[in-house]
Amino acid sequence: MKDSAVLLIDCPDRKGLVARVAGLLYEHSANILHADQHQDHDLGLFFMRVEFALNGSAGAPPFDLDRFRQAFGPLAAELDMRWNLVSNALRPRVALFCSQYMHCMADLLHRWRSCELDCEIPVIVSNHREVEPLAAFYGISFEHIPVTAAMRGEAEARQLALLAEHKIDLVVLARYMQILPPAFVARYPASIINVHHSFLPAFTGARPYHAAHARGVKLIGATSHYVTEVLDDGPIIEQDVARISHRDQVEDLVARGRDLERLVLSRAVRWHLDRRILCYGNKTVVFD
């Protein structure tokens, strides 16, 4: 809902947290549309997502988000909360990166055009040109930035400048087959989503389907996760699997895996755009 806002909270767990948050929203005449919470009992942590309406009831003025933000600050400080409050009217700006495999890119663009993904996509970046016609079809600016060992630093600087120019909030690696450097990752903490073609933490690296076939597994999977400095080790957002048998060859695994890759990546992107994800440690809470 564009006329709503989302409040995300994580903090040390203690009694009365839900009542304190709900009470303050009530004092500001907020109409809560949805609320969910989770406790990590082992670590003593509390997580909460609250979505509430910004349009006032009949005859009432609209909800004053800035006024509530100022009122919530002291409560958050008292309870040692990390928090984020965003209006759903603000559509995140997304950059899509890919290399030569375009199935995830095509799926995301179709879902975006069908209004399943509430965002703006001002630019597509690739180290190859195969995706350029697809970008043109959807009317999105395409940037070809080759990445070679000799020119890697220059390419990364150009990518970061491009993201800054377009005021990008989220980077989606839709089968972008290049490792991002630590400086790049540090610029977008918990804001770079990758899809890996295996059920992590099994079969990391570049050829997981070949490794899965060699191992004789009976399940293959795909994983969407936030990117960190450690390859294929970021907080996992979504995973899915498909059953295979001894009859399946590598080509069969690749074909079936592509469907999984599309699904887990689109779900992860949608949940991020809906502000349903909280990261802590190397894990995520994904609210319903």
Image: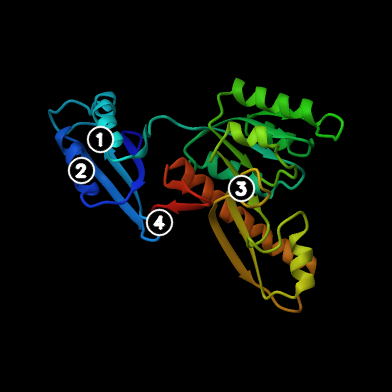
Q: Of all residues shown, which one is farthest toward the top?
A: 165
Q: CA distance from mark 1 to mark 2?
A: 8 Å
Looking at the image, residue 220 lies above or below residue 273: below
Q: Label 1: few (<14), some or many (≥20) within 10 Å?
A: some
Q: Of all residues shown, which one is farthest toward the right?
A: 150
Secondary element at image label 3:
helix
Residue that mark 2 sits on: 20
Residue that mark 3 sits on: 107
Tag 1 and tag 2, C-beta contact below 8 Å: yes
Instruction: Give x and y (percent) for residue 40.
Output: 38, 57
Q: Label 3: few (<14), some or many (≥20) within 10 Å?
A: some
* In front: label 1 or label 4: 4
Residue 130 appears in which quarter of the rendering? top right
Image quadrant holding the N terminus, namely: top left
Residue that mark 1 sits on: 75
Q: Earlier in the sequence, mark 2 or mark 4?
A: 2
Residue that mark 4 sits on: 43
Image quadrant holding the C terminus, namely: bottom left
- Name which residue lies at 53% across and 51% down: 282
Residue 210 appears in which quarter of the rendering? bottom right
Name the amino acid type tagged 4: Leu
Q: Label 4: few (<14), some or many (≥20) within 10 Å?
A: few
- Name which residue lies at 78% across and 28% down: 153
Q: CA distance from mark 2 to mark 3?
A: 42 Å
* In front: label 2 or label 4: 4
Whether residue 144 sits left or right of residue 112 in the image: it is: right
